[in-house]
Each structure stands twice: as C-alpha cells, then as structure tokens.
Amino acid sequence: MDFSLTDEQRMLQDTADRLVREQYTFEERQKLLDSEQGFSAEMWRQYANLGLLGVPFSEASGGFGGGGVELMLISQAFGRGLILEPYLATVVLAGGLLDAAGTEAQKAEYVERIIGGDLIASFAHSEPTSGYALSQVETRAEKQGDGYRLTGRKAVVPHGDSAEWLIVSARISGDTGAEDGIGLFLVDAAAKGVTRRGYPTIDGLRAAEIALDAVEVPGTACLGEPGQGYALIEQAVGRAIVALCAEAVGAMEVACDLTLDYLKQRKQFGVPIGKFQALQHRMVDMRIELEQARSMAILAASSLDAGREERERVLSAAKCLIGKAGRHVAEEAIQLHGGIGMTWEYSLPHYAKRLVMIDHQLGDVDFHLERFSDLMETA
Amino acid sequence: MDLHYTAEEQAFREEVRAFMRDKLPGTIAAKVAAGQRLDKDDMVNWHKALNSRGWLAQHWPEEYGGTGWSPVQRHIFEEEAAAANAPPIIPFGVNMVAPVILRFGTEEQKQYYLPRILNSDDWWCQGYSEPGSGSDLASLKTRAVRDGDDYIVNGQKTWTTLGQFADMIFCLVRTDTTVKQQEGITFLLIDMKTPGITVRPIITLDGEHEVNEVFFEDVRVPVANRVGEEGQGWTCAKYLLTFERTGIAGVGHAKEALRHLKYVAGKQLKNGRPLIEDPLFRARIANVEIDLMALEITNLRVVAAAQNGGVPGPESSMLKIKGTVVRQEITDLLRRALGPYALPFVSEALDAGSGVEPVGPDYGAALAADYFNRRKLSIYGGSNEIQKNIISKMILGL
Ligand SMILES: Cc1cc2nc3c(=O)[nH]c(=O)nc-3n(C[C@H](O)[C@H](O)[C@H](O)COP(=O)(O)OP(=O)(O)OC[C@H]3O[C@@H](n4cnc5c(N)ncnc54)[C@H](O)[C@@H]3O)c2cc1C
C-alpha cells in the first residue's frame, strides 16, 4: 500500500493549487456572484490552457486519461478556492457520459470542444419529485421516426442556465422508478420546446429548471444504447461523487485553517480564545472530522476502477461520511468565530454554505446511509 | 403535581386564539408562514395591535401597563402566537430597556419612555457588543466623557440588530478607565438622530440586512439620559440579561417549526412516497420532538420556580442552550427535507408582492437561508459556550 502521489500527480496538484491560490482570490470570486453567468469565462479558458479540462477524459477521447486520484486533486484545489465554474457539470458529468458512451462522431463534436474550453454542457437528470434517486425518471422519450420526442421537467440542473448542450435523461420504457428503459439524449439548449429558468443557488453557484415540451431530437442524439442509460448514469455520478467529496475536503481544509487562525488571533477576557479548553476540544474534533473525510475521499477516488458493487458501496460510504463531516465543520467553524462567522463580507461562511450544500447534491447523508445499508456486507 | 392546564388557563388560551384570529392581519401571518421578509410597518403594526389589547408588555408591572400574566400564561401566549404565525415581538424596547428603566430609571424617565414604548413611538436597539468586546462584554471601550450637562460619546457598537430602523439605542459606555472594568460602565439612552452617529449595514451570510455597525463621533448625550448612577451600567446590564433570557427557550416557536417540518415532510416525496413515511427521516423528526417535549416541561419548571422570585436565575442558561439547539436541529431537518430544492436561492421570492415565484415547492423558498440564519441563535444573547461557563460556575460550582 502506498499513499504517495506520482510525480505527474504532484505536478497536477501544484498546477491546480497555484492557479486557485494566485488567481482565485475571495474578492474576485465575490464579484463573479453578481455577473450574469455567475462564473469566470477567463478562468475557464485558463483551466483549458493548463489542461485541467482534459484530465479526466480517456486518451481515446483526446484527454489525459486521469483517474479518480487526478480528479480528486483538481477538485480539492477547487474546493479550497470555492470556484464557481461548471467543472462538475461540464467535465465530470456531461463529459463523463460522453467519454464513456459517445460515438466517434459525438466525441469529435463535443468532447474536443469541452477539453478546449469552448463548450459548456450539463447533465439534466434530476426531476422535481425524484429527490436523489437516480432511477426516478418521469421525463418521456417517444420514438418518432429515426429520432425521439422528449417531454418532461428537469430540476436543479447544475449550471443548466449557461450550458449550450444538455445531456437529458428520459424514459423510453418502464415505470418511473425502473433502472431499465432510461435513455440519454444530447439536446441543444436552444432547441424548440426547451425552456429554462436559471437562478443562483445559496452557495453562490448557478442552476436551472428546465422544461422539455415535445423537444425533437434525431437518432444521432442518442448517447449509448437506447434504454440502457442507467449504468452509464451511475458511473458518471460515481465520478461526480469523487469530485464532490474532494471539493468538500478542500473546503473543510480552509474552514479549519481559518478557524484555527481565528482562535489564535481573537482575544476575549485578555487571552486568545484558543486558550479556552472548551474551544480547543471543538477545534480538535473539527480536525478529526477533516482527516476522516480526507480518508474517505481518497478511498472513493481509488474505488472507481473496482467492480460495481464494491465501487458503489465505497462511494455511498464516502458521500455519507463527508456529508456529516461537512455539516459538522461548517457549523462549528461558524460557531467558533462568533458573530464574524455570520457575515457575508468574510470568506468563512461561504465555505460553510458550500459544505452544507454539497450534501444536497447527488445524495445526502440519509440517502447514502440507506444505500450503504443495502450494499453493506452483513456477515 | 398536576401537569394539566386549569380551566382558567384553557379559557385564556381560547381568548388568545380568538385574538389571533381577529387581530393578526392575514397578510402578515402569510409572510411569517412563508418565511418572507417583514418590513418595519408589519412589525410596528403588530406591536400596536397587541398594545391596543394591553398585551404588549408582558414583563411589566400592571400599574405601568403590563399584563400581569403568570409564566404559564406567557407560555400559552407564545404558543398561540407562534401557531398563528404572528411575528415575534421585537424585544429591544418592551422587553429589554423597559425593565431597566422600570428598575433603575428616574420617575421622569419612566413617564417619558414607557408610554412611548407601548405606543411604538420609539424603535429601540441594543448597543452592547463592540468589535473587540463580544463574549467579554465588560471590556467594552466606547468612551463617554462628562462635559457639563452632557456626555461626549466616542466609539463603535456592532451587530446592532434592526438598528437601521431605530430611533433610540441603549448603550453601555465606559465612563471611568481607572477602576475595575465592570465598575467603569454606564448605561445611556441615546437618540439615533444625534449628530455624530453613523449606521452602516452588516450583511449576513444569507444576504440579509438585519444587523449594523453604529459609529459614535463626539456624540453629545444629555446626562439626563443616563439610567442609574454613573458606573452602575454593569448592574443594569446584568439585570437586563435576565429578562433577555426569559422566553429564551422559544418553545412555542419550536413547536410551530416542528409542525411545519411535519407538513413539509408530508409533501416532499421519496421514491414516490411522502418523506415522512421514510423510517430514517421519521426517526429524525421523532428524536427532535422528544427533545422538545422535555424542553417544554423543563421550561415550565424553571419559570414556575421563578414565579415568586421574578425572573429565572442561571437555570435559564440551560433553556437558552437546549432551546437554540432544538431550534437549529429543526431548521436542519427542514432544509434536508427539501433535497435538491434546498439549493435554489431566489432572494426576490422572499419579498411578498415581488411577483417572483420561488423555484421548487413554495414552502421551500426560505428554508435553506433560514437554516444558515439560525446559526446566530447559538451565538447571540450570550453564546452557548458562555452559557455553559455560567452553568458550570453558578450551578455546578466548578
Ligand atoms: C445576528 C446577530 C445579532 C446580534 N444582535 C446584537 C444586538 O442587537 N446588540 C448587541 O449588542 N449585540 C448583538 N449581537 C452580538 C452578540 O451578542 C455577540 O456576537 C456575542 O456576544 C458573541 O460575541 P462575538 O461575536 O464577539 O464572539 P467572541 O466573543 O469573539 O466569541 C468567539 C467564540 O469564542 C467563544 N468564547 C468566547 N469566550 C469564551 C470562553 N470564556 N469560554 C469558551 N468559549 C468562549 C464564543 O462562544 C464563540 O464561540 C448579535 C450577534 C449576531 C450574530
């Protein structure tokens, strides 16, 4: 067993860390919140130039063939910087699906542009009443000639407002909750019948509600075998869980650092508040949670190549633990800061918000606890 | 021992309920229910409605216009007000400065300020905390120097809740730097329109403007605005704190929040079934309900024990801790119940009449923001850590 990074991985980590540290200041980030897109097109271009957008794609798709560890290193740096760009939506989710199931033609058309920083895409999957369940797809895909006609509603699609292309999941056959019968379709966000309502999310990111009203797509818009989308979705979501876990670890690191600094600086009753043992133990607990979370992020990143059952079991364990740890660190960091921890001006509460909201993406603590219980070895 | 409400108490509950039905404006209740923003008029109008019934000043002696209610009656009122989605009573005037004026003020101060508080002529805010003095309040630095019949005040207060609406601020200021910290503090009433006062907003993590910084630059305050003697401010402050902590358990509000949680969990779906039928989530709700049941009785025990002695002692610190933890737990479950719909944050949808629809279920628009906002409960009014210090010292003798 070896926890050390390869030279290439260390270089990747340095690149991502340096970029975020030097160019993604909290002040710059806050300005982006008010911009129309809600993120920096210029940073997106830089990620492309530095090769970060191509890292998770297979070499066959024109990427660098990075695995879970590489994705973890990038996402952790992004978590430290609280970045706003659509990496999860475009590269990990939409990109992951295209990489796994795209035809040569589809890859040539979309993947190349994603890696080059010229295409924002997203995965429009969850629905108003689906919660976190991946197989709950009500949106219908009706066969029409060579192609399909899509009707339904998609909820809280990450960066769904700026995506030019959407990968839409829709049911070709079967009941709402069935794993079989789900198809994946490439949909031009400007196509007739697509209406979007974009909005900010409470952690400063963007999302959209998307209505599909008899949207017509050609047969070539199908991604993967028609009706066999579930396994692909699960895999792409698995990679996204690795990214979210690592992002959470990055955000927790900063939240812990800021709180520790504050305990040393802030004086009350004539001493730094870090002298109070009641607070020392609280800070220690935060640190333990962080290390536990880091371990699970590493385990999750390393599980992507495992067999399905093992992989999903580990991913659910990781997302569950990190959901709990994230909430713990977020709440404690605010509390130990006192009033300052409640202010918009200061960076810490924005980390806290992102940490708590990561639990609302791709399955929360309860969802993954239940899923892990189902997959857990009982003897 | 009998934990039932008496016939009189039941009748009182009916009376309060009828009042809420008749006098609480539907528009205001609708805003409170939806977690939408209240404006100053909403809050003032509610104070006026209560006052017209003689129900605003629940902690004052009857001769000055107080209700003369027992702790159980106050508890019933809080429950019914919360259940009816009434706005909270803004405490700074009626429940904070007024008891101090009643206890330490001159007859003139009583005659002038108390009716103005009842009639909502003055909006009060609390000027205690400073950038360098939060938990360690006695270290406060805002200076007041005597100059003839005035004090000249220089310094800064912060976290001043709703100070943007205030006509008056009650402040702790330092009048003597040569004595023990606690002995050099004086309690002043300051008109917010006095030259030299600047109010600046502090925006909280949920994007709201509810707290402020207040700066004082050579602000002249008549000596007649001092409550108690010079150097007696800390005594006033400690006295006020005991009032600040009555009703701190917030049982009525927590019960209403729990009802709302059950409503939301009944509407939200998990695998096509109501979330409240999910064993895991249901158990989480059950757990907090059990805590709340215990808290309600603990609260009534503490206030009953204080019935004759006036206000609760250090036991109220337990109520503050448990009350805020339960409340925060409920807000946590509310945001969780929303699933992915906790994410959308359409601030305009929190303004009634903006015409902007929330994203996702309409009961969900404010829930995630409220979860973050309620982190304040364990910070202000004496942080929960400070409350634990009080309990370990005053109750446990450690
Ligand atoms: C939303 C909001 C509204 C407020 N409204 C008002 C208002 O209207 N008027 C007003 O005057 N003030 C108001 N306050 C201020 C509030 O009273 C202070 O925030 C509170 O007293 C804590 O002080 P602080 O923020 O400076 O934190 P600090 O005192 O700096 O505390 C930081 C952390 O250290 C802990 N700590 C401090 N001392 C000890 C100790 N001895 N042992 C263990 N732990 C300790 C605290 O519990 C906290 O976790 C408000 C605050 C908030 C957040």
Image: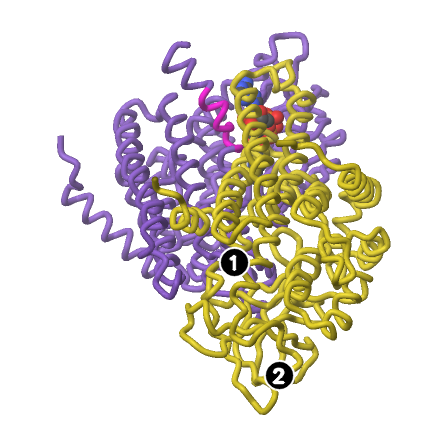
Chain colours: A yellow, B purple
Residue A209 in percent (x, y) is at 58, 69
Chain of residue at mark 2: A
The correct choice, above or below, for B301 with respect to B353 in the image is: above
Q: Quadrant of residue B95?
A: top left
In percent of the image, x 42 and y 72: which residue is there? A176
In percent of the image, x 38 and y 27: which residue is there? B318
Image: magenta residue range: B379-388
- Check disc 2 and give the amino acid type: Gly
Instruction: Evaluate whether residue A324 shows in this view.
Output: yes
| Along the line of sight, the residue nearer the viewer: A226 or B328 | A226
In percent of the image, x 26 and y 37: which residue is there? B72
Residue A167 in percent (x, y) is at 63, 70
The correct choice, above or below, for A367 with respect to B193 in the image is: below
| Disc 1 element | helix
Same subunit: marks 1 and 2: no
Residue B387 on the magenta span: yes
Q: If the image is split into quadrants, where does the N terminus of chain A sit?
A: top right
Chain of residue at mark 1: B
- Ligand 1 placement by image quarter: top right
Q: Which mark is residue B340?
A: 1
Q: Which residue is mark 2?
A: A193
In 3D space, how far apart are the residues under numbered discs 1 and 2 (Cα atoms)? 24 Å
